Amino acid sequence: MKWYLYRSGPGAPAFNMAMDEALLEAMPHLDVPVLRFYAWAESAATFGYFQKYSQVERATHLRPLIRRPTGGGLVPHESDWTYSLVFPAGHPWYRLKAPQTYHYVHQWIQAAFALLGVSTALASEACSSSPGKCFAGWVKSDVLCNGRKIAGAAQRRTRTGLLIQGSIQPGTNWPARLHWEHAMIQLGTDKFGITWVKFEPDAILLECARELVERKYGLPAYNQKR
């Protein structure tokens, strides 16, 4: 079972969101799931597609504030580990209900931390102390460590595919991010039978991402549209 592995490195906040949407739009052509690991060229925050800008701008000092293509709450990107999973419409994960895909991806993350000796648990129920902030509380199947949420995700399903965007908020004295990425890759091979193929975006995909920055994610009018 072939999957693409895309390590895109640090990117501008608007470009990071644009590339995830570009990958989703490209699924009919790629027709292979993509696991993308990426970082941030500067501190930023992203917020859910359906959230109101006027509310999130008061909830964080981080700028820029970029509207995600997925739902969910406000997420700080200062020292977090970010990833995305993108599936074509013909993949079995696409046919699952949102709570199932949420649970499965967090089981995968939990198992990766277990390989590294970090004990975590999946939340059995929701606990929200500050609605709208992704990491202020948790929902069912979020990853918890010592009573703190350390992993959350948001999803978007379209006719072309499924996009999952996730963030890990690491604790102190944790293994290096690269070790966690390696654990995720190893588990993908061992548990899911994935054969990883290195992925690099072609000129068409890069142009699509750049166009999305210019038309959406890089524009205050878009990010502040509601």
Image (spheres, helix red, strand yellow):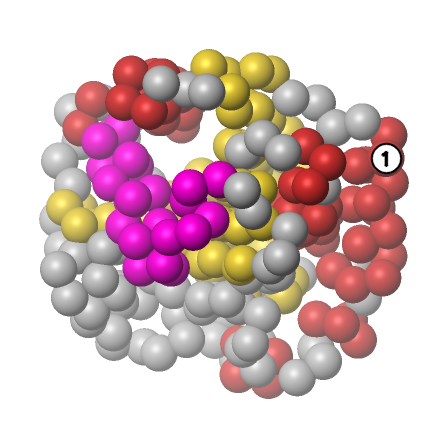
Which residue is found at the position 15% from the left and 66% from the top?
A: 125
Q: Is residue 41 above or below residue 190?
A: below
Is 223 magenta? The answer is no
In the rendered image, which quarter contains the C terminus? bottom right
Q: Position of residue 138 (x, y in %)?
A: 26, 64
Residue 143 visible in the picture:
yes
What residue type is disc 1 on?
Ile
Q: Main secondary structure of the magenta part?
A: helix
Which residue is found at the position 52% from the left and 24% from the top?
A: 3
Please tell me in which quadrant of the rendered image residue 106 appears. Answer: top left
| The one of 200 and 97 positioned closer to us in this rendering | 97
| The one of 47 and 212 positioned closer to us in this rendering | 212
Q: Is residue 145 above or below residue 75?
A: above
Which residue is found at the position 38% from the left and 59% from the top?
A: 98
Q: Mark 1 points at which residue?
A: 204
The magenta segment: 91-113
